[in-house]
Amino acid sequence: MSDFSAEQKRYLEGMAAGMAVVKSVGAPAGAAAPAAPPSGPDAIHLAAQDKTLAAGHKLADPEKWKRAEHPFEAYGRLKREADAGKAPSVPDNFRWRYHGLFWVAPAQTSYMARLRIPNGILNHWQFAGVAALADQYGGGYTHVTTRANLQVREIAPESAAPFLEGLSDLGLTGRGAGADNIRNVTGSPTAGIDPQELIDTRPLARAWHFHILNERAMIGLPRKFNVSFDGGGKIPALEETNDIGFQAVRVLDGAPVEAGVWMRLALGGISGHRDLARDTGAVVRPADCTAVADAIVRVFVAEGDRTNRAKSRLKYVLDRLGFDGFLARVEDVLGRTLDRVDAAHLAPRPMTDRMAHLGVHPQAQDGRIYVGVVVPVGRLTTDQMRGIAAIARELGDGDVRLTVWQNLLVSGVARERAGDVEARLAALGLSAQPTSIRAGLVACTGMTGCKFANAHTKESALDIAAHVEARLALDVPVNIHLTGCPNSCAQHYIGDVGLIGVKVPVGSEGDTVEGYDIVVGGGFAENAAIGRMLWTAVPAERAAVHVEALLRAYLDGRRGPDESFQQFTLRVGVDHLKGVAPAATRALEAAE
């Protein structure tokens, strides 16, 4: 008998996978879990799924998909189907995200690729290499993301595997960059060069990055997971928005542990669900961060909700178990108790600087500076990338440092060459000198490249900046964050002004237009806070007028330039602010 054809083999593989799903996740409610305990590299995840089934619950679809065929075992099929130009099925669109590939149709009939760049730092040749891949396989541009990462878009199916393999040639990867995994590991962007930092976060971020890549238990969690390391430098790492935030602190003499620099442990940040990470009271030796993070993730794997994707983040495990109960479970996994230090024994964190990610700043190294580059809403052409790589190679130390503010730094520049760097940036259409609006302007991809978005956020962000700059002389930085959907990739709740895309009803026929709900008073670092709702269903064409009215009210009503926008909004309250934009809108309509 002749061998099966390739088509027959694919049919049989699919049938076998379907039978596996029926056996493992299609059992009726109340059915017993398999008698034999799971084994192999995914045993911890299979055991958690089995516990859910044994309790009579149904697994969420993504849990079924990864149980039927683990994404890392399916790379050969990804490659075969992509080579044939085939768009992925819904289950495979989920699976391929484990490799960093996101099928974003109908917004774009192509893949978006997300990378892993620990601490957001690349060598100049890697940065230029990503530009070359974006030219060869993508749309000729990249986006700097709010996880100090890069996205490459407009990758055709047949280019997917060559793109991923090209990343490997550069010493980069997209492995685990999407779906139910630990996302890009962030750290202080000025790690190792910041005069005020308490600790260099680069070794900590790299250790955790490689642990994730080489420990299968860290792959395939109940939902996505974020970890960040803040070294106490001038630029905040936004660790309070992460599931795990390690915060460098100086323990003082008289504490129950040795004095020196430790990492304070904060848990449960998820700004899109209106929660920031909270201090646990525990401190961790820097060398133990990977072991502690591993234990936390393992407890999350065991306790996370495998049935309801809306409630499957770490925050909800903490809500259910309580912080003390959760930490007790972590200590069981670790095999020891965590060290705890009262806040009275900790020195205050050095203050952050809201403009330190842009412009020219001195480094800890004598005679050296870093230059923070404005990247408008995070978008870079490949020509700009190659130009930046050349600046880093010829005038800097060779590093390109991405930040969570969707911009980048060129480090290790001789102080006397700062003007040369700025001149070469200008030739690329870029600048190191921001306005008070563009310094904190953050926007997700929006409807241009994301099927979940309700508005063209990047375009709206640039419109708002241009509108405000033409009308107001703002003398302090104000952060404006625009996000397209409740996933809150642009973290709108921590902006001074946050806009979240919504569909706004118009007329009586059920039609809608792009629009935003607007929140105010959010903050981060030493001013961490969740913004409060101010206006709902503002048409996108009126968003800039609303933001202008808010900022004008601030400039007119503040108690001097030392009162920040956040402090102003807290003092006057949202009820006072609700009327400022309608009045401005009426005036605009009258003028029109």
Image (spheres, grey):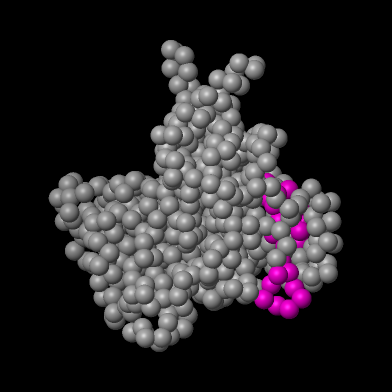
Residue depicted at 83% across the width and 56% down the height: 424
User: Is 224 placed left or right of 193 in the picture?
Assistant: left
Position of 451 with respect to 27 (left or right) is right
Q: Residue furthest top?
A: 508
- Relative to the observer, which residue lies in front, 345 or 541? 345
Percent of width and height locating residue 444 = 56, 44
Residue 387 counted in the magenta span: yes
Name the spot of residue 31 as percent of width and height, x first. Answer: 16, 52
Identify the residue at horizontal 43%, vertical 12% (top origin).
Answer: 508
Q: Residue 295 is drawn in which quadrant?
A: bottom left
Q: For residue 30, say whether it is visible.
A: yes
In magenta stretch: residue 499: no
State the residue in front, 125 or 584.
Answer: 584
- Quadrant containing the C terminus is top right
Q: Say whether residue 236 is left or right of residue 288.
A: right
At 53% from the left and 50% from the top, the residue drawn is 563
Query: How far across and down, in percent of the image, does residue 256 sit?
Result: 33, 84
Of residue 463 and residue 1, the one placed in the foreground of this image is: 463
In the rendered view, tell whether residue 246 sits above or below residue 451.
below
Is residue 394 visible to us here?
no
Residue 128 location (% of width, % of height): 74, 60
Residue drawn at (45%, 69%) of the image: 246
Start-end of magenta stretch: 362-390
**Relative to 396, is 406 above or below?**
above
* Among the 4 quarters of the image, the one containing residue 358: bottom right
